Every structure is written in C-alpha cells, then in structure tokens.
Image (tube, rainbow, N blue to C red):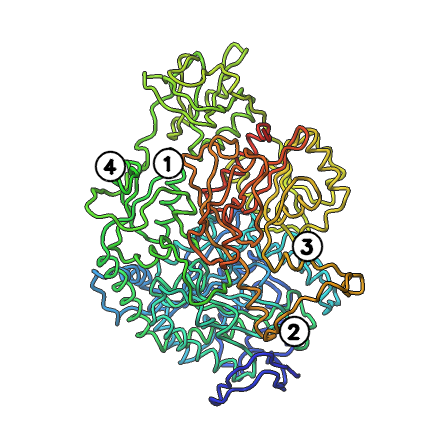
Amino acid sequence: MWLIFNMPFRSFAGSSLVCGGCLFIGASLFSLGAPGGEPGQVTLADLLDPLPEVDSAVPTPAEVLGIEVGERHWYHHEIIEYLDALAEVSPRVQALGEHGRTYGGRPLVAYAISSPDNLARLDEIRLARTALSDPEAKIDRRQIPAVMHLGYSIHGDEPSGANASPLVAHYLAAVRDPALAAQLEDVVILLNPVFNPDGLDRFAHWTNSHRGFVPSADPLDREHRQVFVTGRTNYYWFDLNRDWLAHQHPESRGRLQLFHEWMPNVQLDFHEMQPDSTAFFQPGVPERIHPLTPRRNRELTHSIAEYYRRAFDKDGTLYFSGERFDDFFMGKGSTYPDLFGCVGILFEQASSRGAFQQTGNGLLTFGQSIANQFRMSLASLAATAVLKNDLLDYQETAFADSLQKGRKRGGYYLATAIGDPTRLREFVRVLQGHGIVVRQLTRTVEIEGESYPAGATIAVPLAQSRYIYLESLWERRTDFVENIFYDVSSWTLPLAFNLQYTRDPVVRVKTKPLDEAFPGGTASEAMGGSPVGYLIDWRDSASAPLLASLLEAGALVRVAKAPFTAVVAGGDALDFGYGTLLVSRGLAPEISSEILELLSEATGRGLPVHPVMSSATAQGIDLGSREFAILKKPRVILLTGPGFNQFQAGEIWHLFDQRLRMPITMVDWGRLEQADLREYSHVLVVGGSAKLGFLGEGVVGKLKLFIEDGGVLWTQGNAVDWAVEKELAEGVWRETEEEKAEAEKDTDDDGTMADDSVPRPKVERRPFAEARDRKAFKLVRGAIFSASVDPSHPIGYGYGSEFLPVFRNRNRFLEPSINAYSTPVQYSESPLLSGYISAENLELASGSAGIVVDQQGQGAVVLAIDDPCFRAFWWGTQRLLVNAVFFGKLLESP
C-alpha cells in the first residue's frame, strides 16, 4: 500500500520534519483480516492473541442470539438482549435500568461493569462520585474508583461502535486475567451501548435489507448508500452529538442525567468517518481548544492518547491526531465533559457502512471497524486504571477552581422573558440539566434601563461549582486564536432564547430558591365565563399549540392587527399587542363545550387566557373591529426527499409534531407534481444540495400557480437562492468585490476573453496548501447577529421588542426589499453579537435582510435567510416560522 502525504509532519520516531509529498509504504491500515466464516464476523479469538482464559459460564454473543458480532448489523434490541443476558450471569456486570426512552419508544439503558466488590457497593460509589463535584464535601478519594463512560454510536449510521459493545462487554465479563481484574478494581465502567437507538435501527434495517447473499464491496452499491433520511439522526432527524448543550431530546436528557449522577473521569465518544480514512483520536487541533478548557485537561488528554498510540502501533494500524477535529464547541460528546472535571475523548474509525467495502486502503470489513472500536475501548480502560489518581485529583481540583473563580466574580446573572414564561421555563430546564443552580428574584430591580420583575426573573449565582460551564453558555466571544471551526463558533444561550438578560453579574439582589411553578406563581384559578369571548396573549410560546388545538376543534379565532387595552373579567384593564387572539362564538348561539374545555385546561396550566365582558375596549380597536382577522386552520406541506437538508427538515417536523402538536404533510419532492395543492395553505422548502437544482421546472411551475392562487411558500437557507433564481420571488444578493469581479468576466465557451481589449485580470499566486483555509475564513460557521424585527408585521407578532438575536451559518446576504414594509427582519448596522465572521462578510451583513416577504398574486413567498429553528433550541426565532404558518393570509406587500 502506498500513501502520499500532502502536508508536512513530524515522525514520532524522531524530531526531524518530514516534508510533504513523501511516500509511505505500509501493509495495511487495518490489522484485522476478514475473520470467521463470513466477512466481518469477529470474536474474542480473532481479537486476542494469545486468547486468555475465558469463563465458559459467560455466554458468547452467538450463544445468546445465534449470530456472531459483525455477521450482520445488530439491532438495538439484540444488543440489549445480549447485555441483559450478561448481567444475569456475570458478577462483573450490573444493569442500571432505563434512563430514558426515545421518541420511537426504544429504551435507553446503561450497564455498570467492574469488580464484584465494587458492584456490591455501587450506590455508595455513585453517591461519593456526585459528592466529588462539591468542593465543600469531604471525600476520601482513595476509596473511590475512577469512572469511565463508554458511549457508542451517537450517529446511528456509524454502527461499528454499538456493534463492538457486545464484544467489549463479553471480554470484560468473561476473561480471567489478573491485569483485567486489577483494572476493574480501580475503574467502574459505564457502558452505554447505543446512544441513538432510533438512528441505529434505521441504518441496520437499511443495510441488512440491501445486502445480498453475495454482498457487494462496490462503494456505489445501495447497501452503502443511504437515501433521505439517514441513520445518522434520531427520530426527528437531529444530530444528537450537537444536543449535549441544549438537550432538547429524550436521548440527550437521559444521557445528561446519567452523566451527572456518575460524574465520570473519562468519557469516550465512538464514531466513524469516511471509508477511505484511517483512524483518529484526540487531542484535536491545538489552536482550536476552547479557552475555558483547563490546561490539566489537555495534559491528561495527551497522557491517555499515549495508550492509543501503543495499541494501534502494536497492530500496525495507521491513525492521526492533532488535526481536522477540534475541541471548541462545548456541546459535543467529547467536549462537553471537559468543563466538568472529566476528560472527553473522540475516536473516529473508517466506516465500511455495510458488510465490507472497497476503499483506497484496500477491502474494509465491518469486522475490522468493530475491531478498532474494541481496541480503543480496552486501551481507554488501561489508561484510566493507570491514571486513576491523576484523574481523581484533576476532577476535584477542577470543581474547586470553578467555584473559586465564580466566587471571585460574585453576583448573579439575571434573565427574564416578559410575557413568555413558557420560554423562560425551558431556559431554566436547560440550565438545571447541567447541574447549574438557578434561583429567582424576590425584589424587582432595574439594570441599565431595563426592569427585571420579581417572580418572573431568574438569578443564576456565579458562586457555584458549575460556574465554568455556566460561563461558556453566557459569554459572548468575538476574538479567537483560530478562525476555522469544525462546528459553530458561538452558542450564547440567553441570546438563543431571546431573553432580556444581564451580560455581567449583578450584586446586592434578593433571591430565593425557585418556586415549583416558576415563573408566574401557581396555576390560574378556574376560568370564568364570558358572553363575548376570550383573549389569548400571543407572546407566550404555549399560545401557539393552543391555537392549533382550537382551530382543529373548529373554533372561531381572530387575530388582532393592532394593539388595544381591554377590561377583562375581574375588572383589570390589560394591554394587548399585535397578534392577540380572540375566541368568540360569532353567529353561533354559544361557544362549544369542546372549545371551552380547551380554554379551561390552558387556564389551569397558567396560560394567558382572559374572559372579556364587552366588545368595547378602554383604548385602541374594539373587539368587533375589522382589524381583527379571522384565522383558518393551516394545512402545511413540508418538502422532503433526496437532496434536502435532513436536519432543517427535521427541525420543522419536530416543531410541528412536538411543540405545536399539529399535523404536517411531508411530501417527497418527486411526488409534488401529482399533489392537488388547492387543499393546502403552505409549502415549506428548506435548504439542500446543489442549490436545489434537483427540483425541475414542473415543480417550479406548480408552486407558481399555488402562490398566485393564495398559497404561502416559505423558503429558508439556500432555498432562498433557488426561489430567487427561479423567479418565484424578487431578491438581490450582495456581493464581495471578488465576486463582482468574477461576475463581470465575459468569456467565450472556450474560456478566452470575449473582448480582446479588456485586459485579463492580474491574479496574485498563493500557496496551494492555503486554499482550504482561505475558503474556510470566508465561511460563517455559526455566529449570532442582532436584527430588528417589526412587531406590527404578521411575521413579528408576539415579539415584545424590536431587538432579535438571530443565528447564521451561511455567507450569502440579501438586500432588503424595495418595498419599505416587506422586510420584517433586518440586520442591524453593527450586527455581530458573538462568534466569527470575516470583516468582508461583516460589511455585507450590515443592514442586510433577515426575512423578506414578497407578495405574488393572492399569495406570498417568504425568503428566510437563516434557520429559525436551529437545532430546536433557538426558541427566540422559531416564532418567525410559527407566525408565517398561522398568519399566512395576512402576508402581503402593502
């Protein structure tokens, strides 16, 4: 095998620099052949030479399930069945039960593996582990084993990790070896066999269903090539390895609960990468480590990595470290632990996808991928056992240092969401999921001209052991050592939730522990009756699912297009803004009991439902005004299928299904031409590959008629580019000077200049190796910007102020509409709040459009440049899409 290196590197054997372009000649990237009778099958005998003594009373995988590991892709229930069988017979394995259930109903389970003595006092160890994070607790660390968390296949189509977990468990339970017995005395292993059961089963079904009795190694074969949607994602098509921070999904909530119950010292995150790759383990790119990561964490990462080098060098397996992957975004499985006194380790292994696949390195079998996951697991155990005392010292010191730094700064971070307690409660849930202490304000304060009301404001003390992670969530950062990012460059949580908050801590405030029903106190009393109707404050995020339920039940609901002040039952005069809902009987003799029950239930949950006794208001429009528009139940299509961004599509499906609790019709784009769109009110189009060039003219023509007949077309991401290019809407893109020069080039088909009098532009030569980085510097890889939203526009209904933080991860910028009323969201003149953007792109972003509404015929096209539902935790902007759906008939260009 020959490899050509195109980057300089240093050999571990010496200090001399080896220049780029050198040849490497090796036998293989993978040491394990095709063991067993079938390609990919693998047993302990294939992995261990010599094979140590094995306890025959502990069953092998084949003895329990009738199939060998690697013979085909195992399903989640099969992996659990085998591990449960081990827990029944082995004194080294104990099932910890469920820590959650997936959306698909699959149990999320974990197992403790250690010495019998440790398992006999497991509860004692767990409680002592939790106490380690409390610097005030007095713990004898000599009596506590280290804890190592093995987490496999958070991406379901990276299955070798999950499929290796039965072999790892079999080895740990069955092998009679003094060295292993000593390791198990020093370490409790939390084995989390499948982080993403729904995704794993989706992929297992795909590859098992498309594998022939004579499998194909051709990379183009259907077995290796998934279509929309892939097994990488969970039930709603989310990447769960980006959900550690926001934990919006049950898999992540269960993981965090397990993590904080056990406070591991080392956490392994097992992945796969492209088939032509080798293997990777951390450390990652040294310049791209988050500044809050303790130096001792980095040192221990290097110490642990030495065990991986020995394991893979022994077998002649190629690997790399220190490049490509980074440790900046603190919301992945290998970075999240780093701010909790734990060492997170990412492992990436080349993927065979199916049974075996021909790669540039030779034939890669499923068994080979599994074998390297097995080796990585065992090497991690060896490292954790040897470094036990160092790891425990680091953990204790990390929490003590975090508390000390928090105390030194002192005070509280304050945050509130005026009119939207639902959004604030979700924010509190996210913080508490990380073990962060949250209190509530008991006396109203005013900070920099903004009021923070008692009973509706949280106060987060900086003097707590989780201060460092709190700081990573709260900070705004615009200066970086390295301006290239593997993931996002900013994730400031109060901005994501569009909260009114203090950037700096506030001192001398009165607080108390959170009430059970915070914010808003206890649930409302029983809803009173009304001869006129009921007003619903649209600012509360919980009002949207209530509206969906009311429309489904046939309620007559109007929306206010102007603010007013009304006297509600009890005599209070309350102010109501744009978007306020009015539920009335209309010409019917009364409001139906079903609708009254929905309103009463909402009132009992504390939602802002107000009975009114008169159509006359104290100020502003009356309730019978034509400025109240009647709403119709939306019928929405979400375009899906190959080519579309599955993450963006999944975000919208999740929003409708889990938060709005209303149906959405997902239609693969190839079927759209056969659909009768007259039955629908909206078509939603997300971004995708090739600027959606796969959508033919038949689809475009169909959508033009749909819009002209009164439909609403929502486009986001590069679907906006497609809509403008296909003349579904009007839009003008901003360009850099380089892009303008490129566009001005007028060339013939053969590439020569059409006008010989025009001089060929002079181009300065640059080093070839810099091309990739130069391109990366121009990207916007997840930054936060300030925009202004128009609360009087239907897109902006429910927003209490014009200030709106938005998340952006693309570098195209749209001019505002030439219609002064049709840019409801516009970037500010100095828009960067947090994250990285080049100076050139920042200039383009200034004053550019965030959302443009373009009326076409009786309908409208919404051009949403950014992703309003990003990873399900941008609660501050998801309202933009919700408004476009419920108030679609109000979208026009005045």
Mark 2: amino acid: Leu
Q: Is residue 180 above or below residue 663?
A: below
Q: At 36% from the left edge and 49% from the top edge, which residue is drawn?
A: 431
Q: Amino acid at mark 3?
A: Ala
Q: CA distance from mark 4 to mark 2?
A: 64 Å
Q: Between marks 4 and 1, how big is the CA–CA gap?
A: 16 Å
- As measured in the structure, the alpha-carbon distance from the residue carrying label 1 to the one carrying label 2 is 53 Å
Mark 4 vs mark 2: in front = 4
| Callout 1 secondary element | helix
Residue 155 placement (x, y as % from top left): 55, 59
Q: Which residue is mark 4?
A: 444
Question: Could you tell me residue 558's position as x and y percent?
Answer: 51, 22
For mark 1, what is the residue?
Answer: 421
> Furthest residue to the front?
757
Q: CA distance from mark 3 to mark 1?
A: 41 Å
Look at the numbered disc 4 and give the secondary structure of its residue. loop
For badge 1, the amino acid type reads Pro
Residues marked 3 and 1 touching at CB (< 8 Å): no
Q: Which mark is residue 364?
A: 2
